Amino acid sequence: MLHTGSAVAEVIEGGRKDPARRVVDHLGRRRVLLLLDNCEHVIQAAADLADRLLAECPGVTVLATSREPLGVPGEAVLPVEPLPDPSALRLLGERGAAARPGFRTDEDPAACAELCRRLDGLPLAIELAAARLRGLTPRQLADRLDSRFALLTAGSRTLLPRQQTLRAVVDWSWDLLGDRERAVLRRLSVFAGGCTLESAEAVVADAEVPRAEVADLLLSLVDKSLLVAGLGDQPRYWMLETIHEYAAERLAEAAETAVADRHTRHYRELGRAARARLRGPEQLDELARLDSEQENIRAALRRAVDAGQEQDALVLALSMAGYWMLRDYRAESRAWFEAVAALGPDPFAEDAPPPVPLAVGPLDVPLPMPPEQLAEARRHLGLHRLLSMFSGDMSMLDNSGALRTARRILETYTPDLPQSYRNPVLSRVFTVFLTGEMERTREVMDDAVAGARAHGGPGDLAYALQLRARLLNDLAGGLDQAIADSEEALALYTAMGDRWGLADALSAKAENATKSGDAAQAELAFRQAIELSTQLGAHQEVPMLRARLGEVVAERDPEAGERMVREAIAESAAGTGDAEGARLYGRLVMCHLHVRRGEYAEALAVLDQLPADPAVRGPLPSVFGGIITCIRGWVVARSGDPRTGLDLMRDGRRAMTELEGGATVFVEHMAMMLMTPIAGALVEYARQYGHPAAARRAAELLGAHDGLSGTPGSFMERAEHTRSVQALRELLGPDGYAAAHEKGGRLTLGEATALMNDPGTFDPAGD
């Protein structure tokens, strides 16, 4: 009785105490792990209790689960991350099998992986999705996740109401927020791919949410597990997809259209500011910044296009044109240029007003643009659009609309306009390839360099110089000027701190050195260009540079050179555009290396791989297919069967001449690369059959090549050229060779092409 009475007295006395005091007294010096679950809805009380227990009960450890930290001394926060992919898939498989016996994630692994990813690896969301597998396939479910809050409503009846549907789960967190936290969260949904603090301040802040409070509100949302904060010098904030969709619904309900407008303006100006920094010492930092902001820039551009906001769209597209080129986003840039161009009139229509002289460009003036700057912006976009259509797609050579635009561009930008000599208008020099006026190329380039000196900035002049350096490299008598141009361009780009320009200028310098036979200089310049391109992340440029480097290195170390070429081919395997060109070029180099070693079967095996290559199967397959057939003929001729080899070359040339329009002149220039191998096949024919006419025709073709292009532009071509010259001097005698070579050297491009296509070239005996 005494014992019982004592216990009753303790209970009565304890009932008069503060409940927290009773817990503290009870735990006293016990060693206990105390679990406080779901603290977020009583966060202050939970924090007070934990703080008191830790202060007065040294043996107590508190483990609290909450959507935000308790904020008490000694607290160690361990974020509960979403399930990793394997665990999420396993959970989906287990819960799916419970809902539909026999279900396995390997029935449709792609759809199951998409479900887990788009549900952010959240266990409750995955369990709700798994319940829907009773009546939907994984693919049907994944395709309907844009309506996830209406879809995922089949939670267990034994769960708390706030855990029975996906919407209830997020509603619970939303209801715990203050008004400003809610405003910030819903406004952040306008961002795609997250944002920096500075971007959030620019877009989210207004009279309701002062700019000075945005940082604290972001941190509060991070603490409440509604935002994720990244690490690094420029931390980014983003939402899980489920939270993002919920916040977007709330933003739509609030009808705060000004938020989207601020987002568009912010990224429009971010792109405008980035344009200049992309060509200076801040280049790498700016590239990283644009890489991280691409989703936001796309969202702003899509919004501007959909709303018909032409000037916003023009500034965004023109500002991003250089970035898209550097990152090889060719298909995307082409689509954007088309979409933005559709918002305004054709600036190169026959009745379009002519441009007026402009001291600055359209990206250098605020919006709204004056009429003359708006017209110039449309012309800039039209030029980018044309070049993006042509880039990697030579079918444009037969596109009448593209040819008309190209001619109008050349007619529109006259020498009296200062903007004719600033970027992007300097790129108009490429339109001579489309119009078939390639004989004007030297004239247009000389004018571009002179005009850039007078009216352009250092970047404009450097660009014009490195373009002319490449052009002159392929013209007879132009090598000295090409070398001078590439050196001046290098100096200008170095002073600007422009790695992108430096890589281009170094590539031009390497080509000049190759042309002059300076293998050591070419190797050094190619290596430097590769290093810079790698730093920039211009990965599409590297395979071609490496293939060219391997070709040069093979002169001193065939094994190392071949290894580099094979690496270039492997690097280009997944690429497009320039990478496809590198794959084609690399295989042609491999073919030459095999021929040098007398490995003719191996050389033909390399060529056998090319018809399936996208670079050959793509636009103008007859041109590339014809070139490959001609090279095959050269290999066959070198292997000891010149008659069959010349037959193949004839077939290849016929395929290349099936085109019309602007393509014809362009293909004539491409055919220049075949003069040396055709001459080589004729040399083999003359040797085998003792046919002097074949030898004379070979000498004439070499003369035409040298008269139009100068010395061979690659070490491989130079080796074949030298071999043929030595043989022809033996077959014709020094004087006979000189006479035939001189005769060919007087031919124009058209006459040289006609000589190459002459039936007597491929059938010297007239059979």
Image: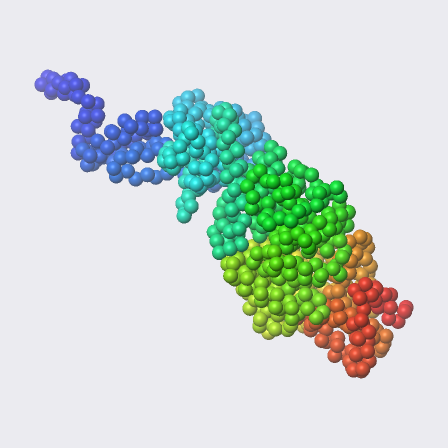
The answer to whether residue 631 is above or below residue 237 is below
Q: Quadrant of the N terminus?
A: top left
Q: Position of residue 383 (x, y in %)?
A: 67, 48
The residue depicted at 57 percent of the width and 30 percent of the height is: 144
Q: Position of residue 254 (x, y in %)?
A: 48, 25
Q: Is residue 157 or residue 14 the one in the foreground?
A: 14
Displayed quadrant of residue 570: bottom right
The residue depicted at 69 percent of the width and 48 percent of the height is: 386
The answer to whether residue 281 is above or below residue 38 is below
203 left or right, relative to 759: left
Q: Is residue 587 visible?
A: no
The residue depicted at 40 percent of the width and 23 percent of the height is: 160
Q: Is residue 109 or residue 407 the one in the foreground?
A: 407
Q: How many marks?
A: 0
Displayed quadrant of residue 183: top left
Q: Position of residue 327 (x, y in %)?
A: 57, 51
Q: Residue furthest right?
A: 767
The answer to whether residue 149 is above or below residue 674 is above
Q: Position of residue 736 (x, y in %)?
A: 82, 80
Q: Quadrant of the C terminus?
A: bottom right
Q: Is residue 145 or residue 359 the one in the foreground?
A: 359
The residue depicted at 71 percent of the width and 75 percent of the height is: 722
Q: Is residue 746 or residue 336 the one in the foreground?
A: 746
Q: Is residue 670 visible?
A: yes
